[in-house]
Amino acid sequence: MTRAEVKERNRRALLDAAFAVVSRDGYRAKLEEIAERAGLTTGAVYSLFGSKNGLVVAVVADYLRPYYEDIERAVPAELDLLDAVDAFARHYRRSCDAPDARAALSLQVTLLDMALHDPHLGTRLAESVRAQEEHLIALFTGRSHDGGAVTSHQAQRLTTALRALFVGLSQGVTLGLAPGADERYFADAARALASGMSLIDHHTDAP
């Protein structure tokens, strides 16, 4: 095994171990336990990620990357905005039934708790999530809607609103608080939001 392969194997082991320990313990997660679970030393964490916070940020990016890649595959490029939002909503709802849905919710709540206890980490986590959300912004930008094409700024506004909607709904589904929220419910709610919200690009239309 080459040095690069060993490095990637160790990186993967630490990411998987950190996901498990951080999801369970949040800001109380101990670096020593993460390293031990990965079969490595804490020195490997500092060598590969710089710090515990660096490892947590990498865990989030690692978790979100395939999630956004799946969304891009689920939303065909030829759809107009409302049909794209519909497809996105249905894909999001299906993820609520995935085997790891509860683990994903646990991670969301844990990361929020960690961000509240460590504002510097919170800033880094927000930057990581925003970087991943650029995939969604790009996914909606340029799609036809109401006689025009969605701008990047409009897509950003929509992405923020959809994220808030789906996070809330998915938490309700996972916790049993939204028993009637099936794929159609998600799609109808998302379509109503996209249709009803102002997609005016205030950056260009302001007097």
Image (tube, helix red, strand yellow):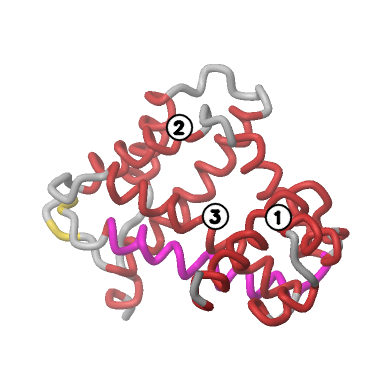
Residue for badge 1: 17
The quarter of the displayed image where residue 60 is located: bottom right
Q: Are marks 3 and 2 in contact (CB under 8 Å)?
A: no
Q: Is 63 on the left or on the right of 56, as rendered?
A: left
In front: 51, or 105? 51
Secondary structure at numbered mark 1: helix
From the top left corner, tell me how far across and down residue 69 is, in percent: 36, 53
The furthest residue to the front: 1
Amino acid carrying mark 3 in the image: Tyr
Q: Are marks 3 and 1 in contact (CB under 8 Å)?
A: no
In front: 108, or 5? 5
In front: 61, or 113? 61
Q: Which residues are magenta?
A: 117-139
Image height of 65 relative to 127, above or below: above
Q: Total marks drawn?
A: 3
The quarter of the displayed image where residue 200 is located: bottom left
The residue sitting at 57% across, 64% down in the picture is: 9
The residue sitting at 59% across, 35% down in the picture is: 101
**Mark 1 and mark 2: span between their CA atoms?**
27 Å
The residue sitting at 68% across, 49% down in the picture is: 107
Quick one: label 1 or label 2, which is nearer the N terminus?
Answer: 1
**Mark 3 and mark 2: span between their CA atoms?**
18 Å
Residue for badge 3: 63
Residue for badge 2: 93
Q: Is 36 on the left or on the right of 100, as rendered?
A: right
Quick one: label 3 or label 2, which is nearer the N terminus?
Answer: 3
Amino acid carrying mark 1 in the image: Ala
In front: 150, or 61? 61
Amino acid carrying mark 2 in the image: Arg
Label 1 Cα neighbours within 10 Å, binned few <14 / some 14-19 / many ≥20: many
